[in-house]
Image (cartoon, rainbow, N blue to C red):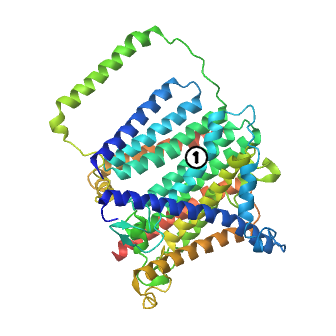
Amino acid sequence: MSHLSPFQTFLLLSILKIAVVLVITLTAVAYTVLLERKVLGRMQNRWGPSRVGPFGLLQPLADGIKLFLKEDMMPLAVERPLFVLAPIIALSCALISIAVVPFGAPAYYRGVNLTQIADLNIGLLVVLGITSIGVYGIALSGWSSNNKYSLFGSLRAAAQVISYELALGLSLVGVVMRAQSLRLRDIVDSQGAHGAFSWNVFGGLQIIAFFIYLMAAYAETNRAPFDLPEAESELVAGYHTEYSSMKFAMFFMAEYANMITVACVATLMFFGGASSPFGHLFDGFANGVVAHVAFSIFWFVFKIFSFILLYIWVRATLPRFRYDQLMSFGWKFLLPIAMVNILATALALAYHG
Amino acid sequence: MPAALQIALFVIFGLLAVAAAVNLLLQRHPINCALSLVVVMMSLAVLYWSLGAEFLAAAQVIVYAGAIMVLFVFVVMLLNAGEEERTHGSRIAYIAGIPGAAALFCLLVFVFLSERQHLGTTQIGGYLTNATSNIRDISHMLFTSLLLPFEVTSILILIAILGAVVLARKEL
């Protein structure tokens, strides 16, 4: 690769990074579905999928083939362009946010960082902005389906996402103030000094912000106990009632990709990103750059995995909220606490600095 | 980044913004108009970003495309507004509107071209290197020299919120 100009190297490596991250994310999405079904099954005292392949490990493949081969039904009275556009918006918005996530210690090859697709000064704002664009996928799918259950589902989902976006954004302000930057790499670096003790959730005293973020994120991704948009007993299946085949699969994948994004952001903001919980204690064992980067990626994946397990555990444990409870919880409880947290963090920073 | 790529970025998103704006005027269904406006906002955000105003770009996406336009789409969905009927419009609009718009366009072009030296130049896409971070500058400016306008704007928005609460109270 020595005869390539720096720009060509950058371009090639970027395309390679995007391809690798996309493949890994989509595989992770497929296996998150399997993990959820397995763990939910065990928690409800049954087996979960166990027929396809050893321990049911090929189940995602079978699901994928089934969804690909199903008839793609298009109801007659739908608003056709928007009906097709909505799942594309939902899935692409869910996948784009991964681009700014640093998923390992920085590793440079010819000046290109291999462990992050795009290192932006406003990385956090990009994630929040793309999440807020994702609302269009939900809103348009319900409206263009020409079905009252879809419309109700999408209205609920969109209202819920907009309401909880505020609490979510405000819960992250304390972390941004501590890191003095919106760049995700800087935020991770600000928590890297003493392992778990300097993570924002423990040493940074942002544990309240973390719980606000967690609850708002569950509502943001329309997951249990805030999964009112797809409340089966009231709304058939919510905003994707009229969708079938791959269009339905795109909404389904978007939901799980959003879960992974939310877990990534929680890890970066509150749990030190790809840094080891033991700080630099075991750095002697990981000699060389490759081992160091491999260990950092391992910790990142481990933290994401823990968050996804927590998601599944919550879904298996908690019953669904009522809609008015959901709204008053978001606006009257989470939002004021997030504001108090910002004030307290600002006062503490002003006092110390 | 090569200069050709920067020009390409500007041309693609500039044309996209113009095309979406024209589409906004030509579409008959309100939801298509609202979505065209979203595309305009997003293209403008990309142009801001290529000029180095990355915070402004993010704010444009989050506030305009993510919050205000969602509200528009919401209202259109809830009112179930149908397609507009095509009318010929008033005669005054044709007589006064088209020359007026042309005159305004000519005036703006004249001002920009004649004051070119005073406005300075910029390099499209030349700021995409992450070398500058203007969030600190913006916040410093907002809380020192522009503190009074900033606070007055906040109070203005607070008044709007109070007005909305009062109106909603009457309905209950």
Front-most of A268 and B91?
A268
Front-most of B72 and B151?
B72
Judge whether A85 appears above or below A193 on screen.
Answer: above
User: Is A71 left or right of B49, judged from the image as shown?
Assistant: right
Q: Name which residue lies at 43% across and 10% down.
A: B92
> Which quadrant, please, contains the N terminus of chain A?
bottom left
- Residue A246 visible at all: yes
User: Is B124 left or right of B80, judged from the image as shown?
Assistant: left
- Residue A38 falls in image quadrant: bottom right
Which x, y percent locates residue B125? 31, 48
Which x, y percent locates residue A206? 50, 73
User: Is A122 left or right of B146, judged from the image as shown?
Assistant: right
Which x, y percent locates residue A145? 71, 38
Q: Name which residue lies at 56% across and 73% down.
A: A301
Front-most of A326 and A265?
A265
Front-most of A205 and A66?
A66
Q: In the displayed image of the protein, which residue is found farthest to the right?
A: A46
Judge whether B17 appears above or below A120 on screen.
Answer: above
The amino acid sitting under disc 1 is Ile
